[in-house]
Image: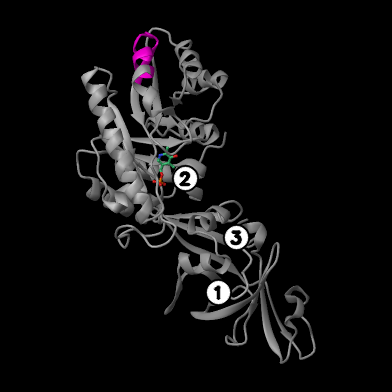
């Protein structure tokens, strides 16, 4: 995937990650702990380099669902607490705690499995509450009783209580406002009952962006750290200070050919050729996460500081129309994202080819390109 053998890459700017984290810190204020959600290989940005940058940036803890990625962080000396989102069977909980990871508990079977692993010191766990999303967690009405039951188990220490109330638009924001208030009420009740865990968290990217605040002492953000909007369309709140961490996707031309009138570009189906055309081919296709353009989109790449139309995306190749850059030759860079000269292609524009959300576009490009990092490279110990 590297160098001259497969010249196709993605560049992640860890300076932007640090800037986005600083913006979240500024918005939530100094009293709040920031947990970083790094599930899904850090939203496709690479769990280890991202975790290291976030550790330098001062997050309190990391949260993920991937045991493999969490273990990779541990093997590479990332010391931050790692809370595992609920994803293990009760039988797997012991393996998480043995690896120095903090499991999320959502029922008594999980709690008993964790407690069974306690030795001299109690096992740290987090409890997840379902405050209305209808997904994972202990349902709202049962949390107090559940925490009371856990408080009688000497092998357990409930280090945190969290919930998740993401929303995608203004209407969702109104829904979340009510659910946040219910969580605040719950925290008050738990404090009175002497059951309040030290860490409490409900806020995530959408609430931080929208300026929703609560009585919890932590937020857990993912999207905003990576410069991605958590909203489906129109943002709720000003996101202009957040910059996408994925800042460049590029490849190099491996062949440039002249096609005469009458030739067909088979890959382009009915496209045909009405005039002579210069065609460039680069080794980046759907297999590398580049999405096929939807009808009506006008996908482009930038070569020598100039926009050129994409003719086709095939499984491993990208075919470009080079008519407007007559001097383009093998080895020239073609950018699908990023800037060159006066031209730039944004993440929104690239995602717009396919109609996919930016996050899905970033995730797709994370699998099979040479990942390069700006602003803090690191060596990785493979497991
Ligand atoms: C992913 C996740 C978050 C972070 O969500 P963002 O919208 O990306 O900030 C927070 N809490 C839980 C439980 C999550 O799964």
How far is mark 3 from mark 2, CA to CA? Answer: 25 Å
In the picture provided, is 60 more to the left or to the right than 88? Answer: left
Indicate if the residue with disc 2 has its beta carbon within 8 Å of ligand 1: no
First of labels 1, 3 by sequence position: 3
**Residue at horizontal 38 percent and vertical 50 percent from the top:** 172
Question: Could you tell me which residue is drawn at 62 percent across and 69 percent down?
Answer: 294
Residue 166 colored magenta?
A: no
Image height check: is 250 above or below 72? below
Q: Which mark is residue 301?
A: 1
In magenta, the rendered stretch is 146-158
Residue on which disc 2 sits: 42
Q: Is residue 187 left or right of residue 6?
A: left
Please tell me which residue lies in front, 307 or 73. 307
| Of the image marks 3 and 2, the number of the one nearer the N terminus | 3
Task: Judge whether 201 appears above or below 305 on screen.
Answer: above
- What is the distance, in whole Å, between disc 2 and disc 1 at their CAs? 27 Å
């Amino acid at each position: 995937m590297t160098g001259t053998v497969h010249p196709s890459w993605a560049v992640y700017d860890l300076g932007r990650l640090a800037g986005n984290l600083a913006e979240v810190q500024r918005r939530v204020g100094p009293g709040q702990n920031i947990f970083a959600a790094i599930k899904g290989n850090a939203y496709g940005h690479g769990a280890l380099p991202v975790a290291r940058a976030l550790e330098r940036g001062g997050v309190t803890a990391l949260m993920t669902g991937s045991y493999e990625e969490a273990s990779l962080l541990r093997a590479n000396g990332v010391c931050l607490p790692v809370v595992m989102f609920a994803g293990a069977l009760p039988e797997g909980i012991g393996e998480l705690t043995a690896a120095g990871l903090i499991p999320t508990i959502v029922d008594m079977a999980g709690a008993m499995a964790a407690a069974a692993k306690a030795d001299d010191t109690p096992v740290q766990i987090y409890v997840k509450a379902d405050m209305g999303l209808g997904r994972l967690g202990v349902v709202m009405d049962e949390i107090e009783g559940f925490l009371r039951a856990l408080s009688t188990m000497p092998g357990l220490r409930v280090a945190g209580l969290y919930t998740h109330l993401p929303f995608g638009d203004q209407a969702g924001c109104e829904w979340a406002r009510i659910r946040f208030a219910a969580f605040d009420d719950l925290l008050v009740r738990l404090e009175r009952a002497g059951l309040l865990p030290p860490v409490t968290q409900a806020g995530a990217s959408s609430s931080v962006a929208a300026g929703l605040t609560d009585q919890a002492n932590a937020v857990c953000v993912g999207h905003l750290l990576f410069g991605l909007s958590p909203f489906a369309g129109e943002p709720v709140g000003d996101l202009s200070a957040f910059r996408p961490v994925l800042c460049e996707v590029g490849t190099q031309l491996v062949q440039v050919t002249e096609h005469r009138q009458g030739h067909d570009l088979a890959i382009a189906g009915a496209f045909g050729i009405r005039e002579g055309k210069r065609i460039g081919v680069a080794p980046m296709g759907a297999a590398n996460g580049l999405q096929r353009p939807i009808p009506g989109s006008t996908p482009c790449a930038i070569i020598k500081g100039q926009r050129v139309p994409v003719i086709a995306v095939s499984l491993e190749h990208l075919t470009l129309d080079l008519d407007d850059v007559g001097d383009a030759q093998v080895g020239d860079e073609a950018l699908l994202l990023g800037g060159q000269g006066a031209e730039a292609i944004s993440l929104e524009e690239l995602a717009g080819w396919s109609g996919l959300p930016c996050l899905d576009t970033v995730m797709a490009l994370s699998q099979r390109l040479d990942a390069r990092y700006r602003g803090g490279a690191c060596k990785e110990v493979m497991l």
